[in-house]
Amino acid sequence: MNIHQLAAALQVLREVITGSIPRGAAAALLDVMASCCALLVKLSEALRGIEDPRVAAAHAQLVEKLFHYTQREQLRSQIHLESTGAHLLDDDELAALRRAQDQNAYGRLHLGAAPRLHSGRAHYGTTADFAAAWLGLNYYGAAARLNDAHLLIARRAMDGGTLAPRLARLAQMYENPGTVDPRRVAQAARALDKFEPADTCFEGTPLPPTVRHADGALMEDHVAAALIEPNRTTSEKQVSTLLSDYRREHGKNHAPDTGIFFRGTRAGVDCYDLRAAGEQAEQLRSMMGQADNPRTQAGKAARSAGRAGTQKAERGTADVEAAEHEEIQTDPLFSSDEPAPDWSGINSGADDATAGEGSENIVDLDGWQAKDEGSQETLFDSAEQDFEFVDSEHDEDAGQSRTTFSDQDPDLGGDADVPPAQRRLNAFLAALGAGTPGQGAKTIAPRIGIHIQLKALDDLRRPDRLTSTTDHGVKLDAAETGRLMCEGAIYRVIFGPDGQPLDVGRTQRFFTEAIKRAALARDRGCIVPGCTAPPEMLECHHDDWWEHGGKTSCRNASCLCRRHHLAIHAGLLTLVKIGGLAYILFPKHVDPLQIPQRNRLYTAA
């Protein structure tokens, strides 16, 4: 039989195996399935030997499809084991099955007669016990697989029969091939099940899902809608936000203590666990984003060989002379001449002279100045300011409880009132903006930009509603938001001409800071769906290219990371305008329907 005859025979076999199968034919079907498994191995080996990228791509796609089918069939097989009472099979039956598997001779099994079961105590008390031993699984893994099957395939009733799964909508999504990765559906089902009361279906009263979102709809419906989001990164963000918001609203979240905790030394390397929240988390994200940008002096310095502590010794004579004459060239994006906060106890270093460097269309977070007032959405930009810490939780590492601390009140605060781990974090963040005189590498100064919706400012008599979100997506509570409003520089975001030079026409190619600021506030990040580039890595792109006659204006500007900016100019991605906003078209092999999309990652919360 040649390969074409084999394909035709398999097609006929696929059409024959439909409808109900008599028990007597089951042995033959097992033989066919075993042969198909062996055939799949041979086919994959043959396909891997063909040096053609098209074959490689198609083969990988088929393997992934088979993997998803196997994931679903694993749970179905658990319900089959449970509903048939396979864990009660007697020793002779199990021994015969094992021989048939080892010899690949299922046709020798006598499956026409009824199975023999243990009349007394069996080897295995439950389906999970049997699955663990029979399939070579860890018991907890087998039990977890069976629990997933109850959530997504069927539940066991009092009489040994099966009932519909508890999470019906997720179960339907799980059964439907080609929509969502079944592992993600199972993971979401497990997370929702933790919020639900224990099911009592085995006692005769199966419980429906009861967990509801703040809007009154079932959480299962919201999670299912998030799972079918086309972009996987956005989908995962939406599901994660739904679950974390529910935990927070219902007191199911226990936030770990913040600070820097020493975790010992391994192979001569000190290990620390750094935890930050709120404003301090935003400072760290800002620092990492700036250090990751290779097109700036600070980013290049962060990539230089050696550790930061050795940089001063490695400086050349020319650098030393330039420093003495205050000629060190710095990047305004990461320059900072502000003193360290008072609470840190660290004196600031000498001022640095600043000079521009790099691309003028990089979103310059450090150069934004407050020149505007009011708009539909307000941002507050603040450098490191005095820290106010309020937490009554107990610090397990420090061995003392936290109390309200404020450097504005000498009667409070003091070294004893701040846990050691938090003191270390405070000092570490202060050092980020404090530079050392004569140091070769440029100090990175974290910047904090927060976004507040206009409706949150409507009634300032309710300060508890005054929350915000930072440029990096960190949610700040009312206390941190209010403090940054008082201490930060306030500027408005403008979505049209209102006294700001948001349209400079063809008089200049590079975007002004006002235009870049407005574009970032509108787009919140790179507009390519799923892109997670931080604000420090963004550039402004002319939607209608400058060389094709496009103007330099906010309406013609879109935020893109460096990678996707180059992809658009290389023709790998297509940008289209709809209603004045830029949307992205992916290649047809990624999106056959060619649906224009924008990044929804920043609105997923």
Image: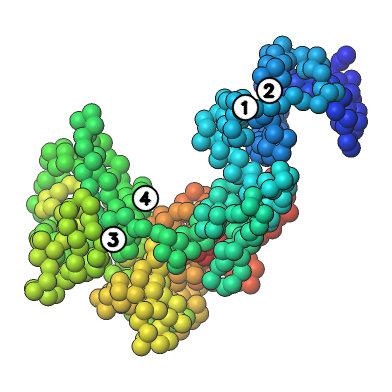
Query: Any mark on residue 122, and which?
Result: 1
The earlier-in-sequence mark between 3 and 4 is 3
Q: State which mark lies toward you, 1 or 4.
A: 1
- What's the distance in space between the residues labelled 2 and 1, CA to CA? 7 Å
- What's the distance in space between the residues labelled 1 and 4, CA to CA? 64 Å
Q: Which residue ends up furthest to the top in the rendered image?
A: 103
The kind of residue on which mark 1 rests is Ala
How many C-alpha atoms fall within 10 Å of the one at disc 1: few (<14), some, or many (≥20)? Answer: some
Mark 2–mark 1 contact, CB under 8 Å?
yes
> For residue 88, what is the image quadrant?
top right
Mark 3–mark 1 contact, CB under 8 Å?
no
Residue at figure coordinates x 39%, y 74% from the top left: 467
- Please state if 539 lies on the left or on the right of 281 as rendered: right
Where is residue 598 shown, x and y percent of the image?
59, 61
Where is residue 381 shown, x and y percent of the image?
32, 71
Residue of label 4: 293
Q: Is residue 361 above or below residue 182?
A: below
The earlier-in-sequence mark between 3 and 1 is 1
Residue at figure coordinates x 13%, y 56% from the top left: 326
> For residue 256, what is the image quadrant?
bottom left
- What's the distance in space between the residues labelled 4 and 2, CA to CA? 66 Å
- Please state if 568 lies on the left or on the right of 537 as rendered: right
- What's the distance in space between the residues labelled 3 and 1, CA to CA? 59 Å
Where is residue 202 shown, x and y percent of the image?
64, 49
Residue of label 3: 280
